[in-house]
Image: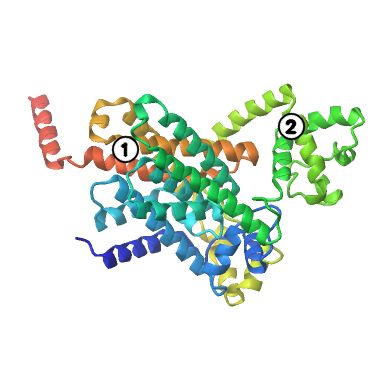
């Protein structure tokens, strides 16, 4: 029997492998939002535009000493999750199979990129995957607690995780109510999943409240919704009519000067009329008016469907940006990790044109994504695949695919279409595809196949 110490060693090795891109870069990757997360966690102040949970994670995991430790912790968490996922769905997980899967995922997906980012994106697949294991696999009480903790921590890192997981759990329980599915998910399991989602909402709200952000998951939801309505052209159309009807909105003064980027552009009307908080009530009234109008609601629904389809297929790794002087990530690293300022400044990310190229990695990921969808078609339609691949694995494949759809819907509907929103999750589809392939071809005899092929060739020649 495999010793516990050996399992821990393989999980640690898997976590190290998953930090490949960060180590190749020379420092964990940063995103324009990274600075805001670091400052919020270190200063203990809840920002208006994001939850504080990931900022606190960075502060405590780094021990206020090194951002590398955050990347290594994210690698270990991901490696542990992959081990649990394989253990739940495979009959036996050997070290070679486990490390082999991690190497394939590192080669054919962007999992290592997201592990290496100082961003909460990594926790989206952990949240969805942990919920899938709770709902669809037989787990002991001890493992259910461990998965529940992982899911809870992952859910509170980003609001889209809470919304998406909530929708996914509800849809899964509705599916469970069909007569043929009632024995697959027990009500106890369903209540545990709902309880984890509820705990995530409560925990996220409580963290914001403790750190001065009010009892809410994020104070700036109205801005993100307004920005999306602006992108879709709905806001301008509404304001042209509402302002002509003498509705006393402050934004009316700027209705013909609204930039495409309503959130972050310096000339955003919100910046000219007191900021996000000062415009909360007015913007919420505008959003309510728009979504209560059947014509606008229809347009919004149609564009949400379109956005979901586009987001579903947009998952390539974004080209990392140089972030040196006068950028928030640089200032955050310089102030909070002063001993790593030089190491950060010479990282490949900050000399992107010379040292980093994600093009080949993106091409490999796109090919594997299409291949994974083809495997899904075979799982649904081929008798040979359905006989070889257990029902639990097929159900998990459907769950992961639905997770991708729901994530695409939530992000494109309530925020915007950005490739990293989907890219952070797509490797979970690759993982379940590898498991399905293992079941389908585990009894494959290569030598017998070669002998048969050779015999057929000889017969054709004769």
Relative side of 72 to 239, left or right? left
| Residue 312 in the image, given as x and y percentages of width and height | 52, 36
Q: In which quarter of the image is the N terminus?
A: bottom left
The residue nearer to you, when weighing 435 against 151, is 151
Q: Provide the residue designation for mark 1.
A: 392
**Which secondary structure lies at badge 2?**
loop
Q: Are marks 1 and 2 in contact (CB under 8 Å)?
A: no
The residue nearer to you, when weighing 424 against 197, is 197
The alpha-carbon separation of the residues under discs 1 and 2 comes to 44 Å
Residue farthest toward the bottom in the current orientation of the protein: 339
Relative side of 457 to 333, left or right? left
| Residue 438 in the image, given as x and y percentages of width and height | 26, 43
| Residue 354 in the image, given as x and y percentages of width and height | 54, 60
| Residue 273 in the image, given as x and y percentages of width and height | 86, 48
Relative side of 31 to 359, left or right? right
Q: Provide the residue designation for mark 2.
A: 233
Relative side of 65 to 284, left or right? left
Residue farthest toward the right in the current orientation of the protein: 246
Q: Earlier in the sequence, mark 1 or mark 2?
A: 2
Can I make out residue 376 in this image? Answer: yes
Q: How crowded is mark 1: few (under 14 residues within 10 Å), some or many (20 or more)?
A: some
The residue nearer to you, when weighing 182 against 318, is 182
Can you tell which of label 1 and label 2 is closer to the viewer? 1
- Above or below residue 1? Residue 110 is above
Q: Which mark is residue 266?
A: none
Residue, x 76% and y 49% (percent of image)?
265
Can I make out residue 427 in this image? Answer: no
Residue, x 31% and y 66% (percent of image)?
9
**Which secondary structure lies at badge 1?**
helix
Q: Residues within 10 Å of mark 2 (few under 14, many from 20)?
A: some
Answer with the quarter of the image where residue 173 lies. top left
């Amino acid at each position: 029997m495999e010793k516990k110490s050996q399992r821990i060693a393989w999980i640690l090795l898997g976590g190290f492998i998953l930090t490949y891109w960060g180590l190749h870069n020379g420092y964990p990757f940063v995103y324009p939002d990274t600075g805001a997360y670091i400052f919020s966690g270190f200063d203990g102040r809840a920002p208006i535009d994001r939850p504080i949970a990931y900022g606190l994670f960075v502060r405590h995991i780094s021990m206020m000493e090194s951002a590398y430790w955050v990347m290594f912790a994210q690698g270990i968490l991901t490696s542990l999750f992959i081990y649990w996922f394989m253990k739940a769905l495979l009959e036996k997980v050997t070290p070679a199979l486990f490390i082999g899967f991690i190497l394939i995922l590192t080669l054919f997906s962007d999992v290592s990129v997201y592990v290496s980012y100082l961003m909460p994106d990594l926790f989206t697949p952990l949240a969805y995957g942990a919920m899938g294991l709770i709902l669809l696999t037989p787990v002991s009480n001890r493992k259910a607690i461990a998965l529940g903790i992982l899911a809870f921590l992952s859910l509170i890192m980003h609001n889209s995780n809470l919304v998406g997981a909530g929708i996914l759990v509800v849809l899964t329980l509705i599916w469970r109510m069909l007569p043929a599915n009632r024995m697959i998910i027990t009500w106890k399991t369903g209540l545990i999943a709902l309880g984890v989602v509820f705990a995530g909402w409560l925990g996220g709200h409580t963290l914001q409240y403790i750190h001065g952000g009010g009892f809410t998951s994020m104070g700036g939801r109205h801005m993100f919704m307004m920005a999306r309505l602006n992108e879709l052209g709905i806001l301008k159309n509404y304001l042209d009519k509402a302002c002509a009807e003498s509705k006393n909105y402050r934004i009316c003064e700027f209705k013909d000067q609204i930039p495409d980027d309503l959130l972050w552009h310096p000339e955003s009307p919100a910046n000219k009329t007191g900021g996000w908080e000062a415009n909360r009530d007015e913007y919420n009234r505008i959003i309510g008016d728009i979504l209560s109008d059947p014509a606008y609601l229809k347009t919004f629904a149609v564009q949400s469907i379109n956005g979901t389809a586009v987001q579903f297929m947009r998952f390539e790794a974004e080209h990392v940006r140089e972030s040196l002087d006068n950028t928030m990530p640089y200032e955050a690293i310089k102030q909070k990790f002063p001993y790593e300022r030089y190491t950060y400044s010479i990282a490949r990310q900050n000399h992107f044109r010379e040292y980093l190229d994600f093009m080949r990695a993106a091409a490999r990921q796109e090919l594997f994504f299409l291949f994974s969808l083809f495997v899904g078609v075979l799982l649904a339609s081929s008798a040979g695949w359905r006989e070889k691949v257990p029902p639990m694995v097929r159900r998990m494949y459907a769950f992961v695919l639905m997770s991708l759809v729901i994530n695409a819907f939530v992000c494109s509907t309530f925020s915007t279409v950005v490739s990293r929103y989907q890219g952070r999750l797509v490797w979970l589809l690759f993982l379940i595809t590898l498991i399905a392939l293992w079941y389908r071809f585990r009894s494959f005899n290569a030598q017998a196949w070669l002998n048969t092929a050779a015999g057929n060739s000889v017969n054709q020649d004769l």
